[in-house]
Amino acid sequence: MPVVKTNWVKKTLGACLAFSFSTLLISSPLITPTIAFAHAEHGTEGGIPTVSPKTKLPKGVSLQVVKSNAFQFALATDGQQQVEILGEDKRAFLRFKSDKLYADLNATGWHRSRQPGGGPVPDRLKNNPKLKPNWVLLDKQPGYGWYDPRLMNEEIAHFNLAMIANGKPVNVRIERIEPEPMTGYWRPTLINEADFTGLNAMVPGLSGNNLMLSRMGTAQGEFQVLDDQGVPFIELRKDGVWLNSMHAWANQVDLFHTSGTEQAPWVKVSETGTVTYADPRLDKKPAKISEIGHWVIPVKLKEGEQQSLLKGELTWQKISENGS
């Protein structure tokens, strides 16, 4: 299925994954919580489940197979469609009506969709699977993410997800594809040392965009890590490491932190003088693997204007047939 690059798809798909079945268990008084655990790698034997590229969905509807703790469907609409999702028994259990989301609590498919491998079905439905539909409004939401046990069944090479879109039946073919083999990876390397006494820097891994900075006991002052506009977003102080929680990169550096305020944006992220964080500049890959990327991270003395530029390269490392 071609990816439709429209704002409603990007916005709604992100929201529908956040509004997953786990959120419903917490927010809806009509649903009894069921705890489930799934192995993140289970379900990939024989290929990765995906929507067939030959699938033609109605305009205003987007469907993808995504992976959270397990594979699940994520459907988004433009808020103007009526779509029903049918279970393996061909009975509708989810209904998208404009911007409203409904579930049939008497449908077996609804209960099966609540856990990766298939949630438990209540005894009342086992004894009488054709109970009258009990449609309940879950939320005003033009998208949703749900589990389908067939996505986790590695013995099923392909199957059809049945739905009714604006009154017309639609069968979406789901098939498993082999992932492309990994031929190499981008490796960041640091090619110089900091000019400041008491500041150590290193790239801790072979890949990724992590950088480790340490303020040693020999340091005379405190240090600031600057962005590309010269604005500090990390500080290595005498009492630990601090993050500017109001900075645009605050949620990209992979540091767990509390929320600050405009009046007090700096929050402590480490009690020690060492921090390992994800720097976006180490992730700016060249257009071609034959090229070498370059990155620069300015570090400044907090008490003055003196700066030191940490410089590095990003090179493509090819993986040989023997795995090295």
Image: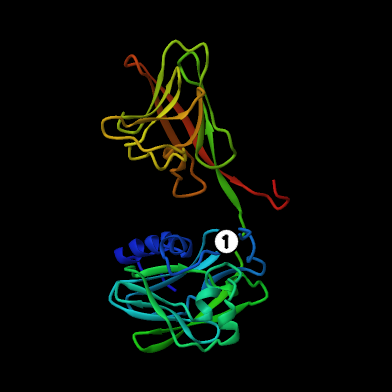
In this picture, residue 224 sits left or right of residue 271: left
* Residue 58 seen: no
Q: Is residue 268 visible?
A: yes
Report the colour scheme: rainbow
Residue 299 image point, x, y percent:
40, 24
Above or below — where is 93 with respect to 295? below
Residue 143 percent coordinates (x, y): 37, 69
* In this rendering, position of residue 184 left or right of residue 297: right
Q: Position of residue 189 (x, y in %)?
A: 54, 33
Q: Residue at x 52, y 67 (%)?
A: 72
Q: Amino acid at mark 1?
A: Ile
Q: Quadrant of the C terminus?
A: top right
- Residue 120 image-quadrant placement: bottom right
- For image coordinates 60% across by 83% down, the residue present is 126
In this rendering, the answer to whether 132 lies above or below 27 is below
Q: Position of residue 188 (x, y in %)?
A: 53, 37
Q: Nearer the viewer, residue 28 or 302?
A: 28
Residue at numbered disc 1: 35
